[in-house]
Image (cartoon, rainbow, N blue to C red):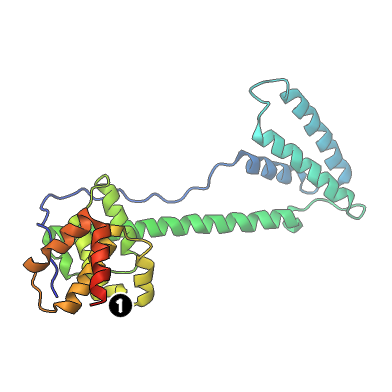
Amino acid sequence: MTTPWPPRRTARRPLAPRVAAPREPVDPARIGRRVVRRRAKGMDAGAIAAALKEARFDARQDSRHEDLADDARGRAELAEWERLAQLLAAAAPGTVYDPDVDDVVRAELAAEAAAAAEREAAVREAQRIAARADELQALRELGTLEQTEPRDGDEAVRDELTRRVGGYVQADVDAWLAHALAAHLGHYRDPAARETAAGLLPPPVLAHAALLAELARLVPGAGVDELAFAARLSTSEPEAAGALAAFLAVL
């Protein structure tokens, strides 16, 4: 079965800017804790108790100044000195602080590494989506989009293309995805991918796909012109198109 395609767009759309590399978010409290740990390395319980006393004095002084009263870094430094004082007080006499064997520090470093990996993965995925959007955009301009099979993640690429044009509904991309979903092309050969698409694609595309699938079953030889109404109905009345597809399914 062939699917009607809207008139080809010939205007070239600008490519999306490249996604920047991830940067570690600035966290004043984390900076404060790191400063304390670097300073405390090698200190014994007495030295840390003296440092804590100094930190408490600084905190009292800062509380008198409105611009310093809500200093996240200062509060974090004081809290860290208090924690280290308790840690060394419970340790054997003569123990000195070593951040490399501090369980709290180890847990924080592990969490930070995991967060950094997530940010990097998100950037890589955004770059993949942007590159695929550029590819589909070029295929549209060449008039060969309908000859291309969709890939896993193209639902997000559709969203990226829509974002680039300010939310404008792109009939050719939606029709392409609906046809692929109905005919089980590309990654839609996998039932799990089709099920996932139901939660990612908008109702008009899903209704169009459902209607095309039932029309293909009932009228296998239907031509392009005969099926043009499916896209129009699905775009203007997706609920009606879905209801029609459900009705046709029982015939």
Q: Residue 63 placed where, x, y %?
A: 73, 24
For residue 242, side relative to residue 78 (left or right): left
For residue 152, side relative to residue 48 (left or right): left
Rendered residue at 64%/55% (across/down): 109
**Count of numbered tags:** 1
Place residue 53 in its image quadrant.
top right
Q: Quadrant of the N terminus?
A: bottom left
Which structural element holds mark 1? helix
Can residue 149 be seen here? The reply is no
For residue 5, side relative to residue 112 (left or right): left
Place residue 231 in its image quadrant.
bottom left
Q: Residue 178 placed where, x, y %?
A: 24, 66
Q: Nearer the viewer, residue 170 or 239?
A: 239
Label 1: few (<14), some (14–19) or many (≥20) C-alpha neighbours in 10 Å = some
Rendered residue at 9%/57% (across/down): 7
Q: Residue 201 placed where, x, y %?
A: 32, 60
**Is 103 situated above or below 219?**
above
Q: Nearer the viewer, residue 201 or 98?
A: 201
Place residue 49 in its image quadrant.
top right
Q: Nearer the viewer, residue 247 or 188?
A: 247
Q: Residue 91 placed where, x, y %?
A: 88, 54
Residue pointed to by mark 1: 189
Q: Quadrant of the C terminus?
A: bottom left
**Is 13 situated above or below 172?**
above
Can residue 159 be seen here? The reply is yes
Rendered residue at 10%/78% (across/down): 221
Rendered residue at 34%/71% (across/down): 194
**Is 29 situated above or below 188?**
above
Which three-letter amino acid code belongs to the residue tagged 1? Arg
